[in-house]
Amino acid sequence: MSILYSDVDGFFISHQMFISKLYDTILSKTENAVHLYEHFFHINNPFVRDKQQIETNSENNVKRKRKRPKYEEDEIGKRIKTFISNLKNHQDIFSSLPKILDNNSCARHASIKFYEKTSEQKTFYGQNPNPNLHVANGYVFPPKCQFYCDNVFNMKNLKDEKYDLILLDPPWTNKYIQRKKKIKQDEGYTMMIDQDLVQLPINEFLNSNGLVCVWCTNSQNHINSLKTVLFPTWNIKYVASWYWIKVTKCGEFICNFAPQTGKQPYERIIFGRKIDSDTEIKNPEENKLIASVPSSVHSHKPPLSEILVPYLPPTPKCLELFARYLLPNWTSYGLEALKFQHQFLYENSEIECNNHKSNIKPNENV
């Protein structure tokens, strides 16, 4: 549904298409009408701060270059660049239309409006056990979903449940996000240190042969902590690291590669398998690459459910912690579990996009 290309090195997926097709399929069986607000994925050119926006000479279309810190390319950087370069040789993956140099104004303004509409979060448990889509109280609920809008450290509410996959997107400590939160206190989870995360009872809720999948920053401290502290405490053995590469609609990286401590155009996904597994099961291969056009909304991660099918049982039970959206046949747990189910994300909106302006007129009834 979302995989547009795959080879031995990795995948190109469409987060936008995944959401659209998911609800189009559901809507074919129900009278409810929702449509993805697609402007979150209008990533036309690399992101820069407004004051650093790329200036283009109107006569010769020459970009002014800025001096950048020296960057020594590592093996992962080389593999990522080669992978994206090869993708550009395949038709229908990237846009062939002229690039719009608007600093992604549509996507950025859509993100601002989204946070204005969804700043208030409720704490409660719920589910949609029915095979049809359900829209209520300003939220869109896919079929066969279950959710806990609650602190993940209360996950003992799950009682005796066991899962084949536990996916986590922890709010790792991050200096940039920490500065940002001083301006917008309500944007995302409170950051956590390793001593917090180690308390999660992952082992207790993971089936034998269960797979753990963790979104991780590029901080070497976080990577080392996950592999040497968190995984052993959770009774998990490290098996592989994958890389999510963020590109524009034209196939450019959303930012430049940077020195080791700088912001990169990719994030890591680290996998572990429960140590007391009693049968052999295929593990994720090392260093797979996933490329996609990202959402402009902070922490709106692309779906991994289709890609992970080969590494899970035929009908897996899946749990996401620190969840921000719902999926059919998944349990979502986190303070923001309904964040990306808000009806604003699925409303038709009249947005004008060009090089000069972006005027958003959302449905005021949301």
Image: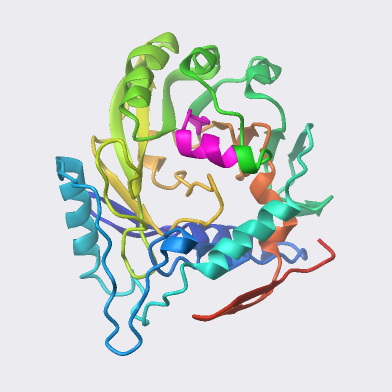
Residue 186 image point, x, y percent: 68, 40
- Residue at (33, 74) in percent of width and height: 92
In this rendering, does residue 207 appear at all?
Answer: yes
- Residue at (46, 33) in percent of width and height: 175
Relative to residue 213, is residue 32 drawn left or right?
A: right
- The image quadrant that residue 246 belongs to is bottom left
For the residue pair 338 and 42, the one nearer the viewer reads as: 42
In magenta stretch: residue 323: no
Q: Reply above or below: 291 against 188.
A: below
In this rendering, does residue 283 appear at all?
Answer: no
Relative to residue 245, is residue 133 drawn left or right?
A: right
In magenta stretch: residue 172: yes
User: Which quadrant: the C terminus?
Assistant: bottom right
For the residue pair 210 and 314, the one nearer the viewer reads as: 210
- The image quadrant that residue 64 belongs to is bottom left
Q: Reply above or below: 242 against 193.
A: below
Check the image and tell me how it is coloured.
rainbow
Residue 238 image point, x, y percent: 31, 21
- Residue at (42, 66) in percent of width and height: 53
The magenta segment is 167-181
Residue 140 image point, x, y percent: 73, 52
Q: How many marks on residues?
A: 0
Relative to residue 244, is residue 159 drawn left or right?
A: right
- Residue at (36, 82) in percent of width and height: 98
